[in-house]
């Protein structure tokens, strides 16, 4: 690491951010190739910007996945069966799972998000609409080690992971994550997951570099969130959004590029970025149906069923535990 990017442990500021978060952010920012975890996109502003991304014409995943559910819901219900516990990974406003309640009739609904606080309002409203479903909201960081508490029934656990967020993991981490889910399943359990598929590079590039600049704002807002968490002094105006499909690695990469030489400091450290240096802010891996089914099989899942749209841009995949 360059001498100028050293940590200075003497200083420290009054802060409420957990120390492991501070440590993770500093480690990423001080790495030779600076990087941050995509989980830091989602502060209050970032969450609203992501909802805006989901309705952009260029961002096909959300509406394509919704269309797949609409078209194939009856067949999905037939394959999956009803009852059991529906465990919603990254539930957010719980809207996608709520569409499944009238057809899958789960006995229990377990929405999980990084902050249980974000879930509270949505769960309260859902509980009124579906009083017979037991609901237990959980705050868990799925990018770290996590375990389900004993309140989650061990009876036909269906892990629901829509939206293709699995793409944020490196493929080897995705495999470990799927193995972890398989281990948490009873024999009647399974996984229902949304997976974004490999397609024409221009379509992928446009989906992450929309003409309105909403994705640019989403990416740049990360710096504001980091300033809040780390008490750093990033100036958003000094950075440029970049996103492109890396065909060789089968992933969208998002970066923030320094428009000029930049000095960023925070209590306890600093980094100098030279013009055109990048912070790597997100990977979003794209799979083929075959490559993803292989991953599920390697993770120990058995029977697999999948549904796609007519363009085969996106897939919803169900895999049974045993
Ligand atoms: C929430 C991870 C599925 O990778 O498409 C959207 C995030 N980043 N536009 C994705 C995202 C930029 C999204 N996931």
Image (cartoon, helix red, strand yellow):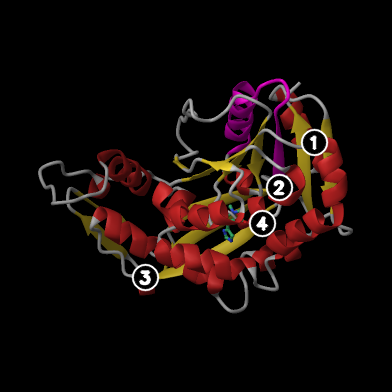
2 or 1: tag closer to the N-terminus: 1
> Which residue is at 58% across, 79% downward?
212
Task: State whether residue 265 is above or below residue 188.
Answer: below
1 and 3 marks in contact (CB < 8 Å):
no
Decide if residue 198 is on the left or right side of residue 258: right
Task: Reply yes or no: does residue 191 show up in magenta.
Answer: yes
Between marks 2 and 1, how big is the CA–CA gap? 18 Å
State the residue lying farthest toward the left: 10
x then y, percent, for residue 193: 70, 42
Q: Quadrant of residue 18?
A: top left
Q: Nearer the viewer, mark 1 or mark 4?
A: 1
Q: Which residue is mark 4?
A: 245
Bounds of the magenta span?
170-195
Between marks 1 and 4, how big is the CA–CA gap? 37 Å
Q: Residues within 10 Å of mark 1 (few under 14, many from 20)?
A: some
Between marks 4 and 3, how big is the CA–CA gap? 24 Å
Q: Which residue is mark 1?
A: 81
Q: Classify mark 4: helix, strand or loop.
A: strand
4 and 2 marks in contact (CB < 8 Å):
no
Q: Classify mark 2: helix, strand or loop.
A: strand
Decide if residue 192 is on the left or right side of residue 53: right
Q: Nearer the viewer, mark 1 or mark 3?
A: 1
State the residue lying farthest toward the front: 132
State the residue lying farthest toward the bottom: 212
> Which residue is at 48% across, 38% downward?
143
Q: Which mark is residue 236?
A: 3
x then y, percent, for residue 162: 66, 48
1 or 4: tag closer to the N-terminus: 1
Q: Which residue is mark 2?
A: 194
Task: State whether residue 125 is above or below residue 296.
Answer: below
Task: State whether residue 88 is above or below residue 222.
Answer: above
x then y, percent, for residue 191: 70, 35
């Amino acid at each position: 690491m360059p001498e100028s990017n050293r940590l200075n442990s003497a200083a420290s500021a009054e802060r409420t951010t957990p120390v492991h978060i501070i440590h993770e952010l500093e480690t990423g920012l001080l790495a030779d190739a600076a990087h941050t975890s995509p989980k830091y996109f989602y502060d209050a502003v970032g969450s609203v910007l992501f909802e805006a991304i989901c309705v952009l014409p260029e961002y096909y995943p959300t509406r394509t996945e919704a269309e797949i559910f609409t078209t194939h819901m009856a067949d999905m219900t037939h394959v999956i069966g009803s009852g059991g516990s529906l465990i919603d990974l990254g539930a957010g406003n719980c809207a996608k799972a709520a569409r499944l309640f009238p057809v899958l009739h789960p006995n229990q609904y377990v929405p999980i998000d990084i902050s249980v606080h974000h879930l509270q309002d949505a769960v309260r409203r859902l509980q009124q609409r579906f009083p017979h479903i037991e609901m237990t909201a959980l705050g868990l960081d799925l990018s770290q080690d996590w375990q389900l508490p004993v309140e989650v029934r061990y009876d036909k656990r269906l892990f629901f992971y829509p939206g293709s967020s699995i793409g944020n993991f490196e493929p080897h981490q995705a495999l470990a994550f799927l193995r972890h889910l398989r281990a948490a399943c009873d024999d009647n359990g399974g996984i229902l997951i949304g997976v974004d598929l490999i397609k024409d590079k221009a379509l992928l590039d446009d989906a992450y570099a929309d003409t309105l600049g909403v994705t640019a704002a989403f990416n740049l807002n990360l710096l504001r969130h980091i300033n809040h968490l780390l008490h750093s002094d990033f100036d958003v105006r000094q950075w440029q959004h970049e996103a492109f499909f890396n065909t060789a690695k089968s992933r969208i990469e998002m970066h923030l590029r320094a428009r000029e030489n930049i000095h960023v400091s925070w209590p306890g450290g600093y980094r100098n970025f030279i013009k055109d240096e990048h912070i790597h802010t997100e990977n979003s891996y794209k799979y083929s149906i075959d490559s993803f089914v292989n991953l599920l099989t390697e993770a120990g899942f058995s029977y697999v069923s999948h549904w796609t749209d007519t363009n085969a841009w996106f897939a919803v995949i169900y895999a049974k535990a045993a």
